[in-house]
Image: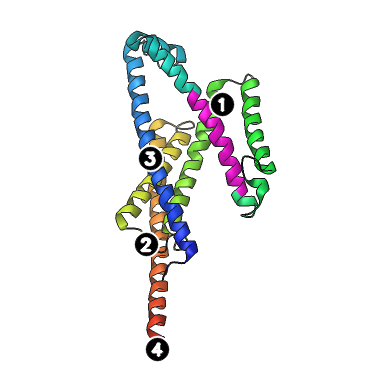
């Protein structure tokens, strides 16, 4: 069927989102490689006893690269915290605004909307309370990582369904791209399940159960996508049949 203006706008938005996700994925991959390399350098230069501390990392950086590396490390931590403060609060306001308001509701439009400001200030105030309470840093970070790990498969599943939904993109995705999306979803399920189960069970048991869960989730997703594509093909065939039955003007 021909695209309506809404479908064209949605397709443009998805295309922009795809470019943003691709860029952020490459940046995250580069940062992960650098973090792994830095950790390997710390383990090689320091006493490996299974523990980790920021002081050990700073000492290794100072020994390997000098004071400039330590300054860059501190600046990077500050930049990461500052950017997270901005993006998390703003993202929460935008997300709640898209769910709880109409398109023209000015109270949910950051930064001047009343409700948007309330959400932004609330998120930052909660972060301030956690930091000022003197709570142990490592357990707080671990809890946040577990929550993020559990949410990641849900977000990945929503992205796959959005890319495959005919309401978002009228034409079906290439099979190779769909396979890449399914693989990404399976990876997130495996990592999330392994991260949670390894805290309560033996590592070998956790990885086997996580692998089984990722396989089951992948099979279920493939079946769902097959059903969605079958329904899309049926609708396309019905549309083409109705077009052939229309009278041809003289």
Residue of label 4: 249
Assign the magenta stretch its main secondary structure. Answer: helix
Is residue 51 shown to the viewer in this render? Answer: no
Q: To which quarter of the image does residue 229 belong?
A: bottom left
Residue of label 2: 172
For disc 2, the neighbor class at 10 Å (few under 14, some 14 to 19, many from 20) is some
Q: Taking 128 as reference, is 243 left or right?
A: left
| Residue for point 48% across, 46% down | 155
Is residue 116 shown to the viewer in this render? Answer: yes
Instruction: Estimate the x, y position of residue 41 in percent, counting from the top left.
Output: 32, 17
Say which of marks 3 and 1 sits in front.
3
Distance (Cα) linking label 3 and label 4: 50 Å
- Give, as a single range, the part of the protein colored magenta: 79-97
Distance (Cα) linking label 4 and label 1: 71 Å
On-image quarter of the N terminus: bottom left
When the figure is inspected, residue 226 is found, relative to residue 195, above or below; the finding is: below
């Amino acid at each position: 069927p021909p695209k309506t203006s809404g479908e064209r706008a949605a397709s443009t938005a998805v295309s922009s989102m795809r470019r943003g996700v691709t860029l952020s994925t490459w940046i995250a991959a580069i940062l992960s490689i650098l973090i792994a390399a830095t950790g390997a350098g710390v383990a090689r230069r320091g006493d490996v006893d299974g523990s980790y501390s920021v002081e050990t990392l700073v000492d290794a950086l100072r020994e390997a690269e000098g004071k400039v590396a330590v300054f860059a490390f501190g600046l990077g931590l500050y930049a990461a915290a500052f950017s997270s403060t901005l993006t998390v609060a703003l993202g929460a306001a935008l997300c709640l605004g898209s769910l709880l308001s109409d398109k023209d509701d000015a109270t949910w439009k950051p930064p001047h909307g009343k409700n948007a400001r309330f959400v932004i200030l609330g998120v930052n105030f909660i972060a301030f309370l956690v930091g000022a309470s003197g709570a142990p840093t490592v357990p707080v970070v671990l809890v946040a990582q577990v929550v993020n790990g559990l949410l990641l498969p849900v977000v990945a599943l929503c992205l796959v369904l959005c890319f495959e939904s005919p309401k978002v993109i009228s034409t079906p995705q290439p099979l190779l791209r769909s396979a890449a999306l399914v693989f990404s979803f399976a990876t997130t399920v495996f990592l999330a399940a392994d991260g949670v189960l390894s805290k309560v069970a033996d590592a070998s048991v956790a990885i086997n159960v996580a692998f089984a869960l990722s396989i089951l989730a992948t099979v279920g997703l493939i079946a769902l996508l097959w059903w969605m594509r079958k329904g899309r093909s049926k609708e396309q065939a019905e549309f083409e049949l109705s077009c052939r039955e229309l009278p041809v003007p003289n």
